[in-house]
Amino acid sequence: MKPFDNKVVVITGAAGGIGEATARMLHAQGARLLLTDREPDGVERLAAELGEGVAAMAVDVSREADNQAMIQEAEKRFGAVNAVFLNAGIEGQVGPMESLDQAAWDKVFAVNVHGVRMGILAALPALRRAGGGSILITASVAGVRGAAGLSPYVSSKHAVMGMMRTAAAELGPEGIRVNTVNPGPVDNRMMRSIEDQANPGHGDEVKAGFVERMPLGRYVTNEEVAGVAALLLSEASSGVTGTHYLVDAGLTAH
């Protein structure tokens, strides 16, 4: 029997990066999946590739109605929701705090904080009907430390950490676990954006600076983060709630 046989998992931000890697891993382990992203093309292609037991839909996580609709769709298609991976997030604008206007902050918080909050609230009735389950949130190493030039992003991930701990304390008695996976620099599109914004035309130098501080001497991969996500979404972590798992190549070790 596979770890996710007879389990239904909803994944936001599934069109690429960590979300796509996790979808592929969970599908191989027997999960039925609803894959969502703001733009539907990527998740529709992925669902078509993975085949039976995988559906896709367009979801803007900053909209309450979209969060509710995705859970309703998962229950309608598959009969239940056992786990939710609230992975969608944006890096936002990079620059000194004093250079960023209200709109820059609002954009990041709409997705990274309120999108997570609305995702949790939308999922709760379905998870209760299923008798419990797992909520996993993609936070970041930025949720446990600061980073110059990334004030909206860092602040949003600190907020998510507090939300996770509070939700875990409130929902534990109902058998609903809540955790975060906290990637360090990942070799994907988001880090390319951060590197290029931090030093336009010299993103490779920014990357080298990160790598110098990482004991493994490299960025982590989408698949390495997905492996930890799969553990936290599965019954193998049934005693784990209210905590965070760093996948950061040792960045926070010193």
Image (cartoon, grey):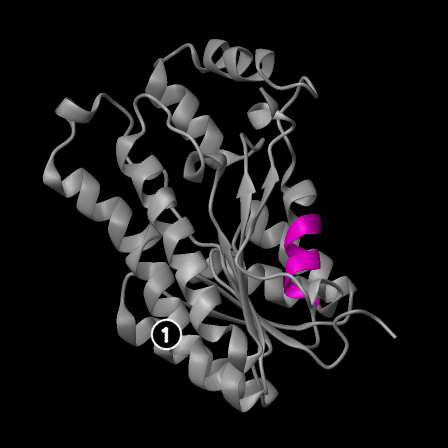
Near mark 1 (Cα within 10 A), the count class, few <14, some 14-19 or many ≥20, is few
**Furthest residue to the right?**
1
Does residue 204 appear to the left or right of 24 in the view shown? left
Does residue 146 appear to the left or right of 130 in the view shown? left
Q: Position of residue 95 (x, y in %)?
A: 25, 22
Viewer-side residue, 123 vs 203: 123
Placement of 54 over or under 150, stated as above or below = below
Viewer-side residue, 9 vs 235: 235
Give the quadrant of residue 9.
Answer: bottom right
Viewer-side residue, 75 vs 155: 155
Q: Position of residue 119 (x, y in %)?
A: 39, 68
Q: How many marks?
A: 1
Residue in the image at 58% along x and 81% along y: 132
Residue in the image at 34% along x and 14% along y: 200
In this figure, which residue is indicated by the disc labeled 1? 121
Quarter containing the C terminus = top right
Placement of 2 over or under 22, stated as above or below = below
Q: Magenta residues? A: 227-234
Q: Is residue 90 magenta?
A: no
Q: Position of residue 168 (x, y in %)?
A: 48, 65
Q: Main secondary structure of the magenta part?
A: helix
Quarter containing the N terminus = bottom right
Residue in the image at 33% along x and 72% along y: 66
The amino acid marked with disc number 1 is: Leu
Q: Secondary structure at mark 1?
A: helix
